[in-house]
Image: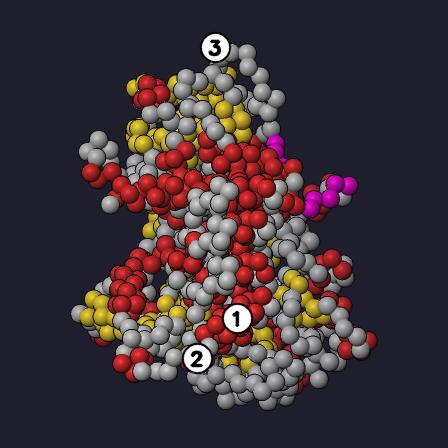
Amino acid sequence: QWLTVNWSPSRIRKAIAKSGLHQLPCQPSTSSLSKTDPEAHIRSTVDWTDSAVYGDHIWFETNASGDYCYVGEQHCIAKALQKSVSRKKCAACKIVAHSICIEQLEKINFRCKPSFRESGSRNIREPIVVRHHWVHRRRQEGKCKQCGKGFQQKFAFHSKEIVAISCSWCKQAYHNKVSCFMLQQIEESCPIGAHAALIVPPTWIVRIRRQQSSMKSSKKKKRTSFKRKSSKKGAEEGRQWKPFIIRPIPSPLMKPLVVFVNPKSGGNQGTKILQSFMWYLNPRQVFDLSQGGPKEGLELYRKVHNLRILACGGDGTVGWILSCLDEQTLNPKPPVAVLPLGTGNDLARTLNWGGGYTDEPLSKILSHVEDGTVVQLDRWNLKVEPNPSAGSEVDEQQTDKLPLDVFNNYFSLGFDAGVTLEFHESREANPEKFNSRFRNKMFYAGVSASQHPAPLCPSLRLQCDGTDLTSKVQDLKLQCLVFLNIPRYCAGTTPWGNPSDHHDFEPQRHDDGYIEVIGFTMTSLATLQVGGHGERLNQCREVTLTTTKPLAVQVDGEPCRLAPSVIHISLRNQANMIQKTKRRTSLPHLNDQQPVPERLRIRVSRIGMTDYEMLHYDKDKLRQSSIPLGLIVVPGDSDLETCREHIQRLQEEEAAKPKIVSSQRLSPKWCFLDSTTADRFYRIDRGQEHLNYVSEISQEEIFILDPEMIVTTTIGTSPSANSDPVDPAPDMRNKMLIECVKSKDLKKLQELHLKGADLTALDQSDCSLLHHAVSSGSKEMVRYILDNAPSDLLDITEKLGETVLHRAASLCHRTICHYLVEAGASLMKTDLQGDTPKNRAERAQDAELAAYLENRQHYQMIQREDQETAV
C-alpha cells in the first residue's frame, strides 16, 4: 500500500490527494495536468512560462538517508528494478522520490503546494482562500499541534510508517491518528503560518491565458519567458501579453517579501538557502540570480504595496539589486535587507546583519526582516571624463571607463586598489591557484609586501566642495585615497575612526549626504587591522579628482587601471535599506507584565565544536555535553556585549588562581549560542551581540561555543602538591615525549602531558618539542603544543640559533608557519647566519611563503611601534 494510516486507506489517500490538488477555487485545465514532458517533471527552477504546470515540484539532489520513496512500494519503479537509484527532494514540500519515480506521483494524484492560480471569470465571485497542503511524513520534528506530544519513531532511516501529517504552508503537524487529525481539517483554510505577513499567497499570482487570436499569430514564434520585450511604442508595450501577473490585496499588516539569492556566494550556502526559502515562502517569491538577474522579479512585483526585498549574497549582489531598482523608477522604492554570503560584507555589517551567515535559522532571519527599521543609504555617482592635459604615457592595461558608475560603499585609488587589481588579474589568469582562503591571504600579503608605491602627488589633484586639498595630500605623502560612504571598510575595519576628540569633523553616517575623504600611507593602512584609522581629510558633498597618469582604482571592490581622467563624485540618490534592530522578541501580555529583573545570576557553560556539529539539533544532549566555566552576575537589561566583558573578567580571575588540575581557557574565537528562541542551538555573530538581550536567550544558564578547545594543565603549588614524590626519571619521560612527537603519536603525547610531562623540555641540541613537531610536519602536534605550552617556547633557539619558525620556513610548511605567526612567533629574529624566517623561505624557493612572511614582519613591526608608543 502507498501508506499506513489509522483510517480507511482509500479514504485518506483520496482526501490527502484532493488537498494537494484543490487548494484554490480556480482549477487548472486538464491539459496542464496531463503533460508528459520529462523536463516538466524534473524541474529545479520555477517555471514562469505559459506552459507552467499547476502544483509542479521543484527538485534538487538530496543525500537523505534511507531508501524510502514517496510514491510508495506499489508504484516505486526503483524497488521493482531492485537497484540503487538516485533520489531527489522537492524544495517546496520536502518530499523525497527516486528520479525515475517522479512521474509516478501523478498516479497517486499528489502535487506540490500550488504557487499560483488560474484566471477565470466564472470563478470571480467565489471566495479566494488558501487551503492546507497536507503531506505525510515518516520523520517530523517538533510536537503535535493537537496533543502536544513529540513524534517518536524507532527506525528513523528505514521505517515506512507514516508518523505525522503536516502542512507545507503553515508547518502545522499532527500525529497520524484519528484522535489528533480530523478528516474535516483537510478542507480547512490555511493561516499560512508564522510568516504570513511576508508570504505572497498563491491567490495573488495569476496566470493569464493567451487569447486565441494572439495564439494563432504566435504559433511560429514560441514565447518562453514572461520577460517584457522592448517596444518603441509605449501603448504596444502596455498591451503586451505576459503569462503571469500579480494581483495583490493590500493590507496594512502585510509586508510581502521578494528574495534574491546569489547561489555563487558563500560556497554552497547560496544553493541551500535558496531551497530553504522555497520551503518557508511561496517558491514564486524566491529568485535565483544566476537565472537572469533581479530585473524580471522586480518588474513582476513592482505594483505590490509595502514590498520588502531580501538580498542574499555579498555587497556586490546588493549593489546589483539597487541599480536595478533605479532602472525600475519605483515610488516609493522597496527597502532592502541583507543576508551576508560574501567575503567582506561591509554594508551588511553597517546595517547590523553581521559579517557572514553561519547557522542562524532562516525563520529567525525572516522575523528580523519583517521587524527591521527602514533607513536611508546614500548612493554616489561616478562620472569620468578623459583628461586632455595629461601626458602621452600609455599603459596597455588602462581603460577609460570604470567597472561601475555608482558606488554604495567606497571608491578608492592608489596602493590598496593596486593590490586588489593584481590579485584580480592573477585569479583571472590562473583560477586553479586561488581555491583556498589561506592561499588568497598569502597572495594578498605577498603583493602588499612586494609593492613600493610612490606618493599619489604630483600625478593627482583633489578638490572637495571647491577646496583644493592637493597640497595636503602632497605634504602627508599619501599613497592611497578612500572616499567612504559607510563606516566599514576592508572586512569590518573603521578607517574614519571616532573623531569625537576632533571638532573639525562629525561622526560618520551613511544617510547624511556627505562622503568622507580619507588618506593612507602603507603603514597607516596596515594599522587598520589593529584599530587604527587613516588621515581624515574632509567631509563633503562633491569631489573632483584629476589624474595625469594611469592609476589603479576600485569601485566597491571592482578594480581597474584608469587612464588619466577627471573624476566627478556627487550624490546620486538615497536607497531604502532595512536595518536589523535591537528588540525584545518575547514581549509579555498586557495582563501578565513581568518587570525585567534588576540583576541576573547566570551559569556559563562551554560547548566544543565537535559536540556542537554532532548534537546541535538535540538540545538536551548538547546541554549534557557542556562544560561549566563559572558564574557571572549582570544587570537584567544587559546585552551580550556586556556579558562578554563579564566572561572575560571571569577568565582572568580563574587564570590568577593556583591550579592543581586541568583548567578550561577560552580561545579568542568563542561566540554565544542561542539555546532558547529556536528549535535548535545556533551561533550569534560577534558583530550582532549588541542587538541581543541576555534575558532573551537565557535567565539561568548561557552557552558559548569555542571552536578551539584549550586545556591547560598546571602543577599546583599547594602543600599537598609539593609533597608529591618527584618523578624519578624525568630524562626518560622527556625522551618518550620526543619519540611521541617524531612518530606523530598525538594520543600518547596527550597521555604523558596529563600525567605531568613537561612540554618545555629540550633535547641535547637545545631543540624543543615544537622544533621536532615542525620537523615531523604534523599540524595536529604543532597545534596541541601551541595550545598547551607557554608562549616563550615560540622563540627558543637551538644551538645554531634556529627558532621553530625558521625551521618551518625552511621546510615550506605553510600552514604551520601560519599557526606560528598567529601564535606570536617573532618574524624578526635571526639565526647565527643572520637569516630571518623570510630569508629561509627565499632560500627554499617558496616565493609565496616568503612574501607572506615579509608582509607579516612589516605588520609585526607596526604593532611593536604601537606598543612602545603606548608605554
SS class, disc 1: helix
- Residue 801 visible to an observer of this rendering: yes
Which quadrant, please, contains the C terminus?
A: top left
Is residue 35 rendered to the left or right of residue 595?
Answer: right
Mark 3 crowd level (few <14, some 14–19, many ≥20, 10 Å Cα):
few
Query: Which residue is at a point 30% across and 45% down the rendered structure image?
Result: 867
Q: Which numbered tag is attached to residue 299?
A: none
- State how far apart marks 3 and 2 are (Cα): 85 Å
Is residue 860 shown left or right of residue 738?
left
Disc 1: which residue: 735
Q: Which residues are magenta?
A: 220-231
Q: Earlier in the sequence, mark 3 or mark 2?
A: 3
Q: Which residue is mark 3?
A: 389
Q: Is residue 338 visible?
A: no
Residue picked out by circle 2? 728
- Tell me residue 413's x, y (percent): 45, 29
Viewport quadrant of the N terminus: bottom right
Vertical relation: 435 (above or below) 719: above
The kind of residue tagged 2 is Pro
Q: Secondary structure at mark 3?
A: loop
The residue positioned 20% from the left and 38% from the top of the image is: 501
Taking the spot 35% from the left edge, 32% from the top edge, the residue there is 518
